[in-house]
Amino acid sequence: MAETMIPKATAKRLPLYYRYLNFLANSGTTKISSTELSEAVKVDSATIRRDFSYFGALGKRGYGYDVTDLLKFFKKILNQDRLTNVALVGVGNLGHALLNYNFRQANNIRISAGFDVNPDLAGTIQSGVPIYPMTDLIDQLRQQQIEIVILTVPTDAAQGITDDLVKAGIKGIMNFTPLRISVPAYVRVQNVDLATELQTLIYFLDHYGPTLKDT
Ligand code: ATP
């Protein structure tokens, strides 16, 4: 299976399909048409058919898609059958919220270690996750073979910590700080700037009204 050939836009929609298929399977639904799937995940059915065609012909005309088959398939592609351990650096308000969020339910992701500079937090267990001092950052990440880190520290601390994460061999950073952190080319960064996202939403509402569609 040439997974590397899947276009980025398609890859981004996979978790969306996966979540919904999981929901269908849990409610006992065994088949679904691309039209039904389209309405549920708000992706047009032509796009869904094209997306699915990258994985080989999975649908049958007049029958639709077999939910269990699709689910098995997506599980493999998304590596859902393996648990991914992720670390979180910065156990403040946002960090706590993410520690409490059940990533595992839908995605088999688990935050297995937290780090914070605050001595009141280091050495404690928060929402079932051990919190280590920053002095243990590199060692612990290496020992636990963690490759992905969620960064929820103040902006001014972000770059320094990022440099340590790179030293520890991290491959991906989910950056919740507004800083555009610098990393070597082999490290991937996903930026999630909640304030900017909200501002963008407000801007679009103010300028284009509530019904703008981007498709
Ligand atoms: P937020 O909602 O953004 O988490 P907050 O008000 O809870 O904000 P911040 O000041 O943004 O707290 O700090 C987030 C967390 O990062 C805190 O728990 C803080 O102790 C921790 N922190 C601050 N500086 C560092 C650092 N250099 N290394 C690691 N953790 C840090």
Image: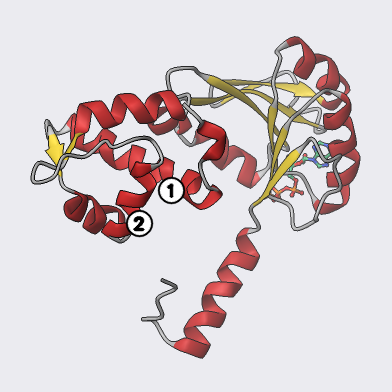
Relative depth, front residue between 107 and 140: 107
Picture quadrant of ligand 1: top right
Residue projecting furthest to the bottom: 207
Q: Can you give x and y, in whole percent of width and height, for residue 186 in the image? A: 79, 35
Q: Can you give x and y, in whole percent of width and height, for residue 156 in the image? A: 87, 51
Image quadrant of residue 180?
Answer: bottom right
Relative depth, front residue between 116 and 83: 83
Residue projecting furthest to the left: 62
Secondary structure of the residue carrying numbered label 2: helix
Q: Is residue 68 above or below residue 41?
A: above
**Left or right: 30 as drawn, with respect to 103:** left
* Category of crowding for the residue at label 1, using alpha-carbon neighbours closer than 10 angstroms: few (below 14), some (14–19), many (at least 20): some
- Chain-order first, disc 2 or disc 1: 1
Q: Can you give x and y, in whole percent of width and height, for residue 181 in the image? A: 83, 49
Q: Amino acid at mark 1?
A: Arg
Q: Which-is-in-front pick, marks 2 and 1?
A: 2
**Left or right: 25 as drawn, with respect to 72:** left
Residue 46 is tagged as: none
Q: Are marks 2 and 1 in contact (CB under 8 Å)?
A: yes
Total residue callouts: 2
Name the residue rendered at 20%, 33% in the picture. 67
Q: Amino acid at mark 2?
A: Thr
Which quadrant of the figure contains the C terminus?
Answer: bottom left
Tell me the distance, in whole angstroms, between the alpha carbons under discs 2 and 1: 10 Å
* Category of crowding for the residue at label 2, using alpha-carbon neighbours closer than 10 angstroms: few (below 14), some (14–19), many (at least 20): few
**Left or right: 163 as drawn, with respect to 78:** right
Name the residue rendered at 23%, 50% in the picture. 37
**To which residue does mark 2 refer?**
47
**To which residue does mark 1 refer?**
13
